[in-house]
């Protein structure tokens, strides 16, 4: 093994969110390509259970940093604690999920090392032994490949959905959990109660099948047709942004850069052109089926199965066939 990769496993309120495991998957893939050991770190207070959960993954070790001043997130306390962890581990790369919390403290952390932060990456490839990180630029119209030329550690954040959480691999045995003591001085800010997002009626990130509609559906009344297909497939209905902007479906059903990021086993796109802001929210789906009248629609570039046709002709047939298979 040469060098190591430190993965920041973000937790809020004693729970990991999906992006923690996406960062693990990113770190593990990079670790394999660079033949580097992967170490995960979790910060907080009374987080033994979280460290044990992480120890099930294929990792060199897990570092548990428990301090009462880390019970609630503050940028000061997190930057102080992470600085000490990074100095102790001396990794080549520090991999973090590109969440609001990370965006808040990671620049401060990178600055303490005088290093760059390569943020919001969508993938990493290893070319001749050195990693190349890809970031979307100009509102997703171009990709930039970034190579860090400074000394390690290199700080990298990955966009939600860039890696699949279920691709984080578990180990054959639990790995070691190291309890690391850190010194944290009283942060300058006092956290207010965490912002409570409006409870989503549906968590599309857990759906195994999603039928998504775009502007090709033409009117709100026609949503019933897509809903029928979703029901036949045992899935959830979702949409591109214009459908939610028009109020035809609630905003929590929007997929894309300003909506939810999903990776169901099956994603059926009906009358969706495949703008980059939509694609970033669903490109990691297992199988993508697209129905679009326009053979040049960009959605076909990432579809596993493409049907160039009028959705109003295709969808009723699909519903019939699915019902037949189910014996209904
Ligand atoms: P269109 O691009 O209009 O495509 C409609 C498609 O339907 C066409 O390809 C057409 O060929 C096809 N069609 C028409 N009639 C039929 C028919 N009868 N049968 C079959 N096919 C048919 N978009 C998102 O989806 N999610 C986001 O989170 C998001 N965030 C954004 C953030 C920013 C900052 C910006 C600038 C934009 C964002 N967008 C987002 C908007 C995005 O750029 C596109 O405008 C949007 O995704 C287009 O939606 P659409 O594919 O439904 O519509």
Image (tube, grey):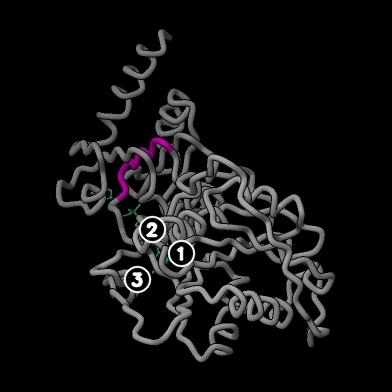
The numbered dot on residue 159 is 1
Q: Is residue 308 visible?
A: yes
Q: Residue at x 45, y 50 (%)?
A: 164
Of all residues shown, which one is farthest toward the top? 327
Quadrant containing the C terminus is top left
Describe the element under mark 2 as helix, strand or loop. loop
Ligand 1 is found in which quarter of the picture? Answer: bottom left
Disc 2 or 3, which lies upstream in sequence? Answer: 3
Query: What residue did someone put label 2 on?
Result: 280
Describe the element under mark 3 as helix, strand or loop. strand
Q: CA distance from mark 2 to mark 3?
A: 16 Å
The numbered dot on residue 10 is none
Which residue range is magenta in the image? 265-272
Q: Is the residue indicated by label 2 positioned so its CB lies within 8 Å of ligand 1? A: yes
Of all residues shown, which one is farthest toward the front? 1
Query: What residue did someone put label 3 on?
Result: 133
- Relative placement, left or right, of 17 versus 189 is left
List x then y, in percent, for residue 154. 45, 78
Label 1 close to label 2 by CB (< 8 Å) = yes
List x then y, in percent, for residue 63. 66, 63
Q: Residue at x 58, y 65 (%)?
A: 8
Q: Within 10 angstroms of label 1, few (less than 14), some, or many (20 or more) residues?
A: many
- Relative placement, left or right, of 171 versus 239 is right
């Amino acid at each position: 093994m040469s060098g190591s990769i430190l993965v920041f496993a973000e937790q809020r309120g004693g729970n990991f969110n999906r992006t923690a495991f996406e960062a693990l998957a990113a770190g593990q893939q990079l670790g394999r390509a660079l033949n580097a050991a992967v170490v995960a770190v979790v910060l907080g207070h009374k987080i033994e259970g979280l460290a044990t959960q992480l120890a099930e993954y294929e990792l060199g070790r897990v570092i548990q940093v428990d301090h009462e001043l880390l019970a609630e997130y503050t940028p000061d306390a997190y930057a102080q604690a992470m600085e000490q962890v990074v100095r102790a581990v001396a990794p080549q790369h520090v991999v973090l999920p590109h969440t609001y919390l990370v965006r808040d403290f990671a620049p401060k952390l990178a600055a303490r090392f005088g290093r760059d932060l390569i943020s919001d990456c969508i993938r990493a490839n290893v070319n001749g032994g050195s990693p190349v990180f890809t970031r979307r630029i100009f509102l997703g119209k171009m990709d930039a490949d970034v190579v860090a030329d400074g000394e390690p550690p290199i700080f990298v954040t990955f966009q939600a959905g860039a890696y699949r959480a279920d691709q984080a691999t578990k180990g054959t045995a639990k790995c070691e959990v190291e309890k690391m003591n850190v010194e944290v001085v009283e942060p300058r800010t006092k956290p207010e109660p965490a912002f409570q997002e409006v409870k989503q009626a549906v968590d599309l990130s857990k759906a195994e099948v999603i039928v998504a509609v775009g502007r090709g559906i033409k009117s709100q009344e026609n949503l019933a047709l897509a809903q029928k297909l979703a029901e036949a497939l045992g899935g959830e209905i979702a949409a591109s942004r214009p459908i939610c902007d028009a109020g035809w479906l609630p905003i929590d059903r929007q997929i894309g850069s300003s909506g939810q990021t999903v990776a169901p086993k099956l994603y059926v796109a009906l009358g969706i052109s495949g703008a980059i802001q939509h694609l970033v929210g669903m490109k990691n789906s297992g199988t993508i089926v697209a129905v679009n009248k326009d053979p040049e629609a960009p959605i076909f570039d990432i579809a596993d199965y493409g049907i160039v046709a009028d959705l109003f002709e295709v969808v009723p047939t699909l519903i019939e066939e699915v019902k037949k298979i189910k014996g209904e």
